[in-house]
Amino acid sequence: MDAPLGLAGESALLPSRIQMAFTLATHVLLVPLGVAFPTLTLVMEGIGIARNDPVALRIARRWSVVMAVQFAVGAVTGTILSFEFGILWPRLMGRFGAALGLGFAIEGLAFFLEAIFIGIYLYGWKRLAPKTHFLLGLVLPPSGVLGTFAVLSANSLMNTPGGITVHEGRVIDIDAAAALFTESIGYEFWHFMIALYMTAGFAVASVYAVAWLRGRRDHYQRLAFVVPFTIAAALTPVQLVVGDLSARALVEDQPAKFAAMEVTWTTRDHNPEVIGGVIDDSGQIHFGVVVPELDSLLVGYSPNAVIRGLSSFPADARPAIVEANITHFAFDVMVGLGVAGAALASSYFWVLARRRRQPEGVWFYRLAAGAGVGCYVAVEMGWITTEVGRQPWIVYGLMRVSDAVTDAPAAYVWTMLATLVVVYALLAYFFVTLLLRLAARWRREDLAPEVGAPYGPRPERLEARG
């Protein structure tokens, strides 16, 4: 058994949770482009090669630069997260590290594979034959998928432990395959993967929606908008179905989390759906919109479906009231933004079907410009729902967060958090500054012949080689 926590460790709990939340929330901002942007770039390059379209190839080359820059920043924030597991939560890694380590090892291999081929892809422009360059780039999407799966397998183990045998507080046996493919990995993986592609598609398209609103409506802007937006819009209805199945699965896998998401206090049938609002210590809902029986209908397709309430769990085995309210708020925001995205996607395809061309309305592009930010907010809310809703457990039913935290003094953790805030602020400044400078440079290049660097040799070098 683990030794009892000292006062220093107890005092480190709050700053450790804040630091983990801060670094996770920051890193997840980079994940959509890191995982899905290579696919968008390859689709654009494929269009350019198939149609012999130099505009599409120019877009793909420029996107590949952004892809490489954000990958570099993501490598820094991801590495920090890896170290935090051992620094902030040593008891977690001490007990479950052998099971969690396999996923992190796979993620490391996927990271190095992606890093190598991003370098080849970036500097292969104009150096490799077009088809060879495109084929080499095909390594990037599965690398991102593999890395995402590996990380989510570790998170799924924390949500629905499997493949491990625990005796007297110690893991004595591990089934590697079962530990990788736990009960929740299926719906967690697909729900998050689709979210990443939707977010990347809407975020990239939002940049060109703003350009459209500013009067730039040439072939370059239209193509750069249509490709990512169409991919994201096509995935939106799929995400609604996968998200619904994921939420329903929590009724069996993590019933306390589901009760927090729906702020259900008492176990009952004919359970209402609560939109907005907060719950108090007595189980009363304030300020929410209550739709009778809807929660039972959504979960069990019948008003007679029984939903377990928070009060049915021991107080030390369920989210606290403040955590339940945070989880409920995050879940409602995520679902609301998903529905809004589906409405925007429907209007897009409606116009395409009826007019055989992309929409021209100003309001459509205003909403499309905000869709990228909306998707990022939805991804953040999804992580909050997953992590806060699991409280007080760091490994559901097996280890509490308070039992996993470091014994280091709180002052040490607060200092580390302050340092990371400064480091991340600097990273954000240089990242945004570099992207703005690249955008300014590319706007100038649109008015003059394109130069090669940083995505290929300069024209004079090509002539010398010829």
Image (spheres, helix red, strand yellow):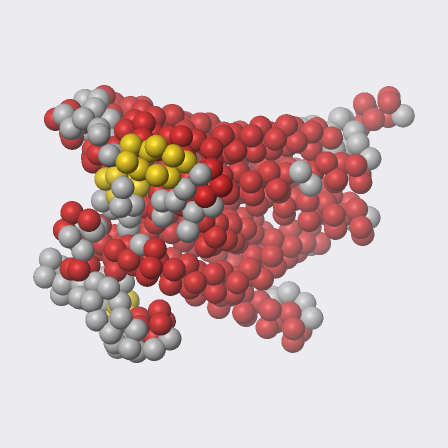
Residue 203 appears in the picture as rendered:
no
Which x, y percent locates residue 176? 47, 37
> Which quadrant would the C terminus be assigned to in this image?
top right
Residue 190 in the figure: left or right of residue 1 = right
Residue 358 appears in the picture as rendered:
yes
Residue 364 in the figure: left or right of residue 280 = right
Kindly identify the residue that appears in the image at 28 percent across and 51 percent down: 389
| Front position in the image: 31 or 464 | 31
Res. 169 image quadrant: top left
Which x, y percent locates residue 437? 56, 33
Q: In this view, does 388 lie above or below 213?
A: above
Which x, y percent locates residue 461? 81, 23
Kindly identify the residue that appears in the image at 63 percent across and 38 percent down: 140
> Which quadrant would the N terminus be assigned to in this image?
top left
Which x, y percent locates residue 305? 30, 73
Kindly identify the residue that appears in the image at 21 percent across and 71 percent down: 268
| Front position in the image: 86 or 234 | 86
Count of numbered circles on the image: 0
Q: Which residue lies furthest to the left in this view?
A: 282
| Front position in the image: 49 or 176 | 176
| Front position in the image: 211 or 128 | 128
Res. 429 image quadrant: top left
Kindly identify the residue that appears in the image at 38 percent across and 63 percent down: 248
